[in-house]
Amino acid sequence: MPTADRVAIVTGAAKPDSIGHAVAVGLAKVGADVVVADLYATGFPEVTRAIEAAGRRCRCVRTDVADPASVDAMVKEAAGTFGRIDVLVNAVGGSWGITAEDLTAPPRRGFVGLTNCSLADWRTILGVNLDGAFYCARAAAPYLRASPGGAIVNFASIAARKGLAPGSEGSSGPYAVAKAGIMALTRQLAVELGADGVRVNCVAPGVVLSGRAQRLMAAIGDERGPEGMASAVPLGRFATVDEVAELVVALCTHETSYMTGVTLDINGAAYMA
């Protein structure tokens, strides 16, 4: 089914320079109306302008994806506003706690491992990255089943592929575990929803130069800059948000209509299974 006149929910899309923001605008450019679900309400006017500039409608809903009641309310509002839901992109996430104040708070320094994380760290990081994707998929499933071409795209990470070495600045063991869970969630949803024509896929990026990542790099203070820090990547650089977003948008269109249950790596050959 063509993307024109479809309705997409994108979580975590209100933050400028984020992958979710680029996905929301990318979907609007190929003809979808977009519901932006995010705690960062400050970004709602900007993402609304960007989507409307692409000629599509936008509805922003303040949503805590780690709270199933908040997710249920958001999905009901999306369906009530536009009358349908065809696409869900679970883009919200991060390797430390995600809050409405996150963009202005200093990046969390150091590495939080599985053996030294607090129970609050564990629950917060899994809640945003794994539980949130589950809650959103569960709430949206009835509407996606009714769509003639429903699609879900989840976000994993290179961290789920190879783990994170102790000392990995600004990241965490719970994040790697949560993103591995996203891969399994994707496969299981693909099996359960396939008979209704709903496709479920996943992308696993390496380091992406989002605003969040650039703030962390600035805090680390490596004199080599992003280019020097990416020297271990065979392509010699990190990904841009647009490169990842374009892949996500493609997974929502009819061009990938026979692709489901897969995780696509986009990491410049930093890791190859």
Image (spheres, rainbow, N blue to C red):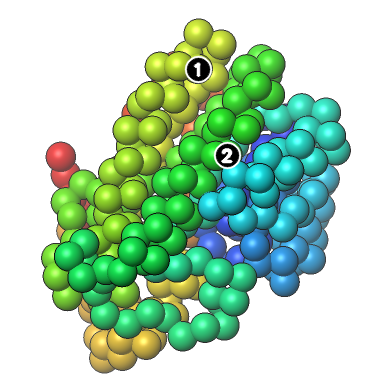
Decide if residue 48 is in sight here.
yes
Residue drawn at (66%, 45%) of the image: 69
Q: Position of residue 190 (x, y in %)?
A: 43, 21
- Dot 1 lies on which element? helix
Classify residue 176 as left or right of residue 32.
left
Residue drawn at (61%, 56%) of the image: 64
Instruction: Give the quarter of the image for residue 136.
Output: top right
Instruction: Give the quarter of the image for residue 262.
Output: top left
What residue would you read off at disc 1? 193
Q: Residue extending furthest top? A: 195
Residue 58 lies, with reference to residue 105, above or below; the image says above
Q: Which amino acid, mark 1?
A: Leu
Q: Position of residue 5 (x, y in %)?
A: 77, 30
Q: Position of residue 211 (x, y in %)?
A: 50, 72
Mark found first going from the N terminus, 1 or 2 = 2
Classify residue 52 as left or right of residue 95.
right
Q: Residue 136 carries which label?
A: 2
Q: Which amino acid, mark 2?
A: Cys
* Nearest the eye: 238 or 143: 143
Residue drawn at (83%, 28%) of the image: 83
Instruction: Give the quarter of the image for residue 202.
Output: top left
Please rate how many residues cluster around mark 1, counting C-alpha atoms within 10 Å: few if below 14, some from 14 to 19, many from 20. some
Query: In what quadrant of the picture does the N terminus appear?
Result: top right
Classify residue 115 as left or right of residue 125.
left
Query: In what quadrant of the picture does the C terminus appear?
Result: top left
Residue drawn at (42%, 81%) of the image: 107
Q: Residue extending furthest front? A: 119
Please rate how many residues cluster around mark 2, counting C-alpha atoms within 10 Å: few if below 14, some from 14 to 19, many from 20. many
Decide if residue 238 is in sight here.
no
